[in-house]
Image (spheres, grey):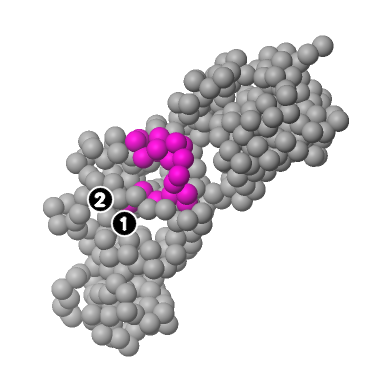
Amino acid sequence: MTMSSEPGERKGQVSIASIAAEAGVSIPTVSKVLNGRPHVAPDTRARVESVIEQHQYRRRRARQSSRPALIDLVFHEMHSAWATEIIRGVEQAAATQRAAVVLSELGGEHRPRREWFEDLLARRPLGVILVLAELDAEQRHQLTTRNIPFVLVDTAGEQPPGVPTVGSANWAGGLAATRHLLSLGHRRIAVISGPTDMLCSRARVDGYRSALEEASVAIAPDFVRYGDFYVHGGYSHGLDLLRRADRPTAIFAGSDFQALGVMRAARELGLSIPDDLSIVGYDDLPVTEWIGPPLTTVRQPLREMATTAAQMVFTLANGERPANERIDLATELIVRASTSAPRA
């Protein structure tokens, strides 16, 4: 049997040497591919990865002491208090395992670039948590063959079976927010959600639609808007909606930041909150209690979501499977002073 300095685990004891021979490359080249090292031609890397996949080669799980106690926390965008809550939740769980957290941002992209991914493979962390980001099939395979577990938080799109994900009950949150406004007597209710390419954004709008349909209230197509989850998205869509002759009497914003933007737009147009306009946000960030008026919002358990994802990573890193691979934590409507019955 051919010996190798970096053995794998599989029936038949496939080794790095045999993979190198079949791919027609050197053993160091295979080692570079396995460890995510640069300076490997793309076609050569693809050929080696193909042989690895064909033989279902897996590196032996490294001993805990020989592997850096790192968790890579990856955001598609990170400049908000929303991201801060996620970071705190992951750090809280990591501290119990004496692990450090490495932060990365993808600059608004939902999928890691090749150069960043190669650096990640070279670090060989205990695991990876991706927030509103996802991996393609090849990236998932590369992490799996290197025994680097990964968990997605608030996944941007539908994931194939077996991909661990943590989110919140976005549909139920949209339903509860809209039902609350309906119960107050509102019938002209608009929604400003996040980008259309995000699963959580679409789910909140689906909850909104379901509540209106349940109450036999017609859905005005132009009252359904998709923003960017940030203040500007709420502000620009808010101005447009509130300048209409048939302006809404209530707006459900798909994030607290967008709700703040709607509030600014309403004030610029001389509208009083909640007398002229009721507003519901989403997330329940700390600032929502202190603005005027305090914001009615859907509480999303951001820290708990992050802590749950980190715990799943540690479970997977220990060679175990989590009890559930898809976890959606409950949301809760928090009623404050930004909502009331519409003017007669």
To which residue does mark 1 refer?
148
N-terminal of the pair, mark 1 or mark 2, is: 2
Query: In which quadrant of the rendered image does the N terminus lie?
Result: bottom left
Q: Residue furthest left?
A: 65
The mark found on residue 70 in the picture is 2
Residue 306 percent across, percent down from the top left? 39, 38
Left of 329 or right of it: where is 120? left
Q: Is residue 187 above or below residue 206?
A: above
Q: Give amino acid for label 1.
A: Ile
Left of 182 or right of it: where is 5? left
Residue span colored magenta = 72-89
Residue at point 24%, 46% (across, down)? 100
Tell whether position 329 is magenta.
Answer: no
Q: Is residue 192 above or below residue 27?
A: above
Q: CA distance from mark 1 to mark 2?
A: 11 Å
Viewer-nearest residue: 65 or 56: 65
Residue 334 percent across, percent down from the top left? 54, 19
